[in-house]
Image (spheres, rainbow, N blue to C red):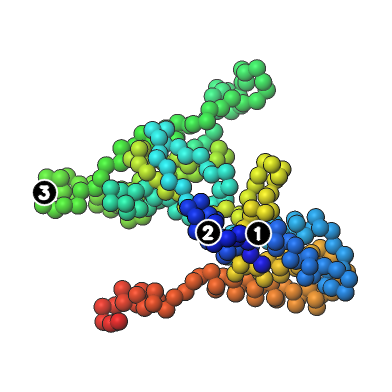
Amino acid sequence: MGLLINTEQGYYASGGDHGNYRFLSLKDIIQAFKATYVGKGKICENVFEGDIVFHAGRALQELSYDTLKVIKNWEVEIPSSLMLVMPVDYINYCKLSWVDESGVERIIYPADKTSNPRNITETVNADGGFTISGATDDLAFTETSDTRDLYMAQDVSPIVTNRQDKDAYNYLEGNRYGIDPAYAQVNGSFYIDEQAGKFHFSSNISGKTVILKYISDGLVTNSEHDGIDYASTLVPKFAEEAMYKHILFAILLSRKDTSGGLLAEIKKQKFAETRKTKLRLQNFKLEEYARILRGGSKIIKH
């Protein structure tokens, strides 16, 4: 099954749902699973629909993390505060980069020598404790810390590499001696404040256009549906069988009367279908592989 398109005219219109034939809705997956596996004489004779819905959502989440990896993109201009709030469906970042004048993406590397700890504003007593002076019994703290402010105030100047500029080169030559290659870059850096749900950038990123590539769990939430919108949540057709096997295995695993042999067989099928999905989504093309080989050695000819 696939998402139905009323007419080709509607599809090719400027506002059509282009490319949606590649997907199934999560609602379709649930209905197809019930028709295939649930009923008298089938492998799941009695199962609550709520269990199917729950395990369908969990299956899509697990596949999205390592197999489907639908990468979402944000392009934003970083303000002078040097902060960016995580997207609402953010799970983990893939890459952060800023765009130069030629449209080339320059990778921003994570900073591993700084953070944004909670800045406690109460005075420390002689015995190491705090005297809480506020109206509540909780410690008072600010969103930004001195550590974060010092990091943001850094002046990250470009490294001069033109040896014709002797004065500039001689000035930098001694300063660059012994530099750690891991930090020998001028693209800037960032760190993630997990507690506040924000990205913090170094000072040279201010005003630059930054691209955030991240992965989500694949689920579409909607306030009108009071949670997950199963009709709008899409699953690639390549992952259809893997979804069925993940749901089936999870349901059988939760039952105390499932035989070990049956469980082992479904688990084997689940791994096989997941591997097949991953191979299909790699979208391997022989011509592209040949181009990689040509780039690795000038001896290889087309």
206 to 286, vertically: above or below:
above
Neighbor class of circle 1 (other Cα within 10 Å; few <14, some 14-19, many 20+) is many
Real-space Cα separation, disc 1 to disc 2, in angstroms: 22 Å
Residue 127 appears in view: no
Mark 3 or mark 2: which comes first in sequence? 2
Q: Secondary structure at mark 2?
A: helix
Q: Secondary structure at mark 3?
A: helix
Q: Residue at x 36, y 37 (%)?
A: 206
Locate residue 198 relative to residue 102 in the image: left or right: right
Q: Secondary structure at mark 1?
A: strand
Q: Tell me the amino acid under the disc marked 2.
A: Gln
Q: Which label number is shown at residue 166?
A: 3
Label 2 sits on residue: 9
Q: Quadrant of the C terminus?
A: bottom left
Neighbor class of circle 3 (other Cα within 10 Å; few <14, some 14-19, many 20+) is few
Residue 243 appears in view: yes
Label 1 sits on residue: 25
Q: Tell me the amino acid under the disc marked 3.
A: Lys
